[in-house]
Amino acid sequence: MHRRDRTTRREERARTSVTRELQGTDEGMAQANSPTDKVRALQRALYVAAKRNGRRKFHALYDRIARPDVLLRAWEQVNSNKGAAGIDGETLQAVEAYGVERMLAEVRELLVTGRYRPRATRRVYIPKPGRPGERRPLSIPVVRDRVVQTAAKLVLEPIFEADFLPCSFGFRPRRNQIQALEQIRQEVNRGARYVVEVDFRDFFGSIDMDLLVGLVANRISDRRVLRLIRLWIKAGVVDAGEYRETTTGVPQGGSISPLMSNIYGHAFDERWMREAGHLGTFVRFADDSVILCRTRAGAQQALEWLQRTAQALKLNLHPEKTRIVDLREGAEGFDFLGFHIRLVESRRRRGWYCQRWPSKRAMASIRAKIKDILAPRYRLKEPIYTLVTELNRTLQGWGNYFRNGNSGRKFAQIDKYVCERLTLFDSKKRGRAGRHWSRTAVVGGHATQQATTVPGHRRPGHRRGRRKAVVHDQAWFASTGVRRLSGTIRWIREATATT
């Protein structure tokens, strides 16, 4: 029996036990009638049915998408994500003012009567982290379309989750980037020395509508659900006030897009396991993938298979970024999910260890964010603790992700950069120049700047060896409350060395 199946059955028995204990009580009645629990029960039933029969096709799902409790749960998720408004300008706050129940009733009526038509998405561009001048396009659906997409995701995801393979880690329940990175580390430490970096050119925008609907139809026989997917793909996009039709791709920014991309990527996973699984290990996170092979010949065969399969699925590989990386003795490394991965020789133990730390792009991205907070002159009028609070939120989010690796040196570099930017900010705020300046003393009613304590530095007119208290010392940085990244590294498991 699969480990995941055992875990699921243990969780089910635990839930059953709790439910029996609550039966007959007010708390038990409330839990049984909770809309959220009804949605979860529907999802469990769909998952179990799909797991038991891998060839079963599901019908009458459209009515479940239009259920009031499913739509309410979908709204709760959309509201918690705090997204922006679509082309109609309707915000989440506007929906709450209008009335959530009223809005959901209108959406349900459109779905039930078959008059629902999604509106075009609003195209926005966000900067790519660590790539100055490059932007990533996002398509923002209107709030009501996001609710319907999320409702469809709640119903469809359990069915396809039963089919997805362990090599897929992106946008799936109880799976994340760190698990994918750990899979890579373990495979490299077991002997994989050649990596095929996979880079698709505009993966989300290149997904073929007919192929995607055909893949969904392998499990879903409800024509109204398939029609919904076609409507979302063909809804069009408004870019800078100009409407454009869309016939391919899924809107990157829609609630249903991660699931649709995983269904399309699952075709890759299945073909790999069936046709080329003997060549190596395939690890995929959404559209980011790597293939880990033990020999160069195996890596070359995997690359040729990849090119053929991408062409069959109407996807384009980036010719320069799709390559074979030689990991032997740290000769080369590769970037994946923000980390740089490379073999490093241990100084204390024999063998080479697979290690990872923030990539150059990740380092450039966090430095840019720190500078955006502390560099603008218009912020000099703000108290330093206000900026430190904002800075700590940025550092905490970045550090919580990259602490799962060999990031100690990179963290120390960021800590040093933060101290430097804080010093410059405080100097400008007080009308001083430079990074290392001492406390001012009042002599005869006039403020004079005293000598700095930088080792080996002596200003003219000061006696040798005279030392004064420095403002920007460790005590000063500690008093600001700025977050330190050093010392926060953690590991999931012990590393395994290979020769």
Image: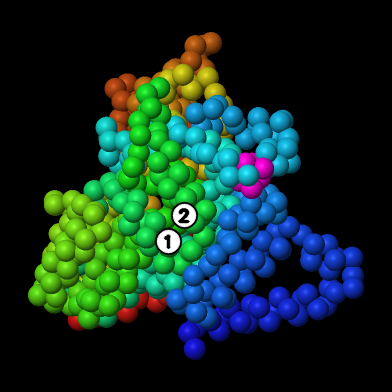
Q: Is residue 378 visible?
A: yes
Instruction: Estimate how packed mark 1 is, as few (under 14), some (14 to 19) or many (20 or more) residues with alpha carbons within 10 Å.
Output: many
Amino acid type, residue under disc 1 in the picture: Val
Front position in the image: 253 or 295: 253
Determine which residue is flagged by label 2: 226
Q: What residue is rendered at 27% in x and 32% in y?
A: 133
Marker count (numbered) = 2
Q: Residue furthest top?
A: 445
Q: Is residue 285 visible?
A: no
Q: Is residue 459 above or below residue 275?
A: above
Q: What residue is rendered at 67% in x and 54% in y?
A: 67
Front position in the image: 464 or 336: 336
What secondary structure characterizes most of the magenta part? helix
Q: Secondary structure at mark 1?
A: helix
Residue 108 within the magenta-colored segment of the rendering: yes
Q: Which mark is residue 216?
A: 1
**Figure quadrant of the C terminus:** bottom left
Q: Which residues are magenta?
A: 107-112
User: Residue 369: x percent and y percent?
Assistant: 40, 37
Q: Are marks 2 and 1 in contact (CB under 8 Å)?
A: yes
Say which label, 2 or 1, has the lower sequence index: 1
Is label 2 or label 1 in front? Answer: 2
